[in-house]
């Protein structure tokens, strides 16, 4: 099994069920003797968590929202993700830039070329020459927005995104599908409408195929 740093992001509309699987995957990698950095966006550093609270709760125009999210990402990338990858950690990141293309680009209808420019600026790091940092793998939890809405109904007080109507999440889902089409080697589509156990099997099969998870550890692990 490889010991180089691995960057895995988790994506999908709200209610797609990423969270329990991220925790289980962290446990599986730890059982395999890997150091794991478990983190999230927007957030992951003290500064980025402050920006997250603003983005999720305060009214603002779409450009301000996009700039704050990318500012949080820059801090997170330099303070947490790049050092972890340099140490050889497995970085499990709950959302990354595909969420910006899906939510700000698809959901809000914000200008795609501007997001692309911000992506190029923010994700250029000395460790990636030439080019920009992207996840090695993106696990995309794909679920019909109507199903996600049923799962979320009454779960908690909704933030600015969770409070959006189902049409918004259809545009977000379309945004994810477009990103997946543009980077098919990086994306693995997970059918998130299946049972928790079947979703876990899809995830571990993907990681075993890539040589990052041993088949033995994957068989012994999973969400409780
Ligand atoms: P979470 O609830 O999965 O932690 O995500 C927080 C919310 O932030 C979620 O509704 C999606 C949204 N979001 C964006 O709108 N753009 C982004 O770039 C990211 C990372 C998250």
Image: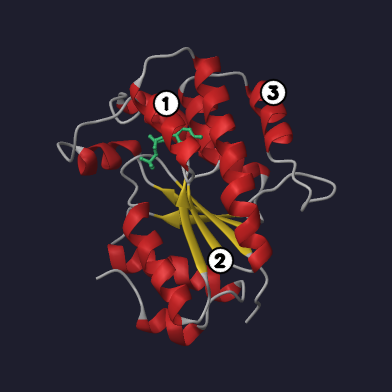
Circle 2 is placed at which residue position? Answer: 90
Q: Secondary structure under badge 3?
A: helix
Q: Earlier in the sequence, mark 3 or mark 1?
A: 1
Q: Is residue 125 above or below residue 198?
A: above
Badge 3 crowding class, 10 Å Cα cut-off, few under 14, some 14 to 19, many 20 or more, is few
Considering every residue shown, the one lying at the far right of the view is 130
Picture quarter containing residue 22? bottom left
How crowded is the residue under tag 2: few (<14 C-alpha within 10 Å), some, or many (20+)? many
N-terminal of the pair, mark 2 or mark 3, is 2
Q: Secondary structure at mark 2?
A: strand
Which of the two residues, 59 or 147, is positioned nearer the viewer here?
59
Between the residue at mark 2 and the residue at mark 3, the CA separation in whole angstroms equals 31 Å
Residue 204 percent location from the top left of the image: 46, 71
Is label 1's Cβ within 8 Å of ligand 1? yes
Q: Residue at x 51, y 81 (%)?
A: 33
Horizontal and vertical percent for residue 47?
49, 36
Task: State which quarter of the image contains the N terminus.
Answer: bottom right
Quick one: SS at disc 1? helix
Marker disc for residue 55: 1
Question: Is 124 in front, or is 155?
Answer: 124
- Residue at image point 56% right, 40% down: 98
Residue matched to label 3: 113
The quadrant of the picture showing ligand 1 is: top left
Residue furthest to the front: 46
How many numbered marks have been drawn onto this rendered protein structure?
A: 3
Is residue 136 visible to us here? no
Identified at 45% across, 28% down, the residue is 171
């Amino acid at each position: 099994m490889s010991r180089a740093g691995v960057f895995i992001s988790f994506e999908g509309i709200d209610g797609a069920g990423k969270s329990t699987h991220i925790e289980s995957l962290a446990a599986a990698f730890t059982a395999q003797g890997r150091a794991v950095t478990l983190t999230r966006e927007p957030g992951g550093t003290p500064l980025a968590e402050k920006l997250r609270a603003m983005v999720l709760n305060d009214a603002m125009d779409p450009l301000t929202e996009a700039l704050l999210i990318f500012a949080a990402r820059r801090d997170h990338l330099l303070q947490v993700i790049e050092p972890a990858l340099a140490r050889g950690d497995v970085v499990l990141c709950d959302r990354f830039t595909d969420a910006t293309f899906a939510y700000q680009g698809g959901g809000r209808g914000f200008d795609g070329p501007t997001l692309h420019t911000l992506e190029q600026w923010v994700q250029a790091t000395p460790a990636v020459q030439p080019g920009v940092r992207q996840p090695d793998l993106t696990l995309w939890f794909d679920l019909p927005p109507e199903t996600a809405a049923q799962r979320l109904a009454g779960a908690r007080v909704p933030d600015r995104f969770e409070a959006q109507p189902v049409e918004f999440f259809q545009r977000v889902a379309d945004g994810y599908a477009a990103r997946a089409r543009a980077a098919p080697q990086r994306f693995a589509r997970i059918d998130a409408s299946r049972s928790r156990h079947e979703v876990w099997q899809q995830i571990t099969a993907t990681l075993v195929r890539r040589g990052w998870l041993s088949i033995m550890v994957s068989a012994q692990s999973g969400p409780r």
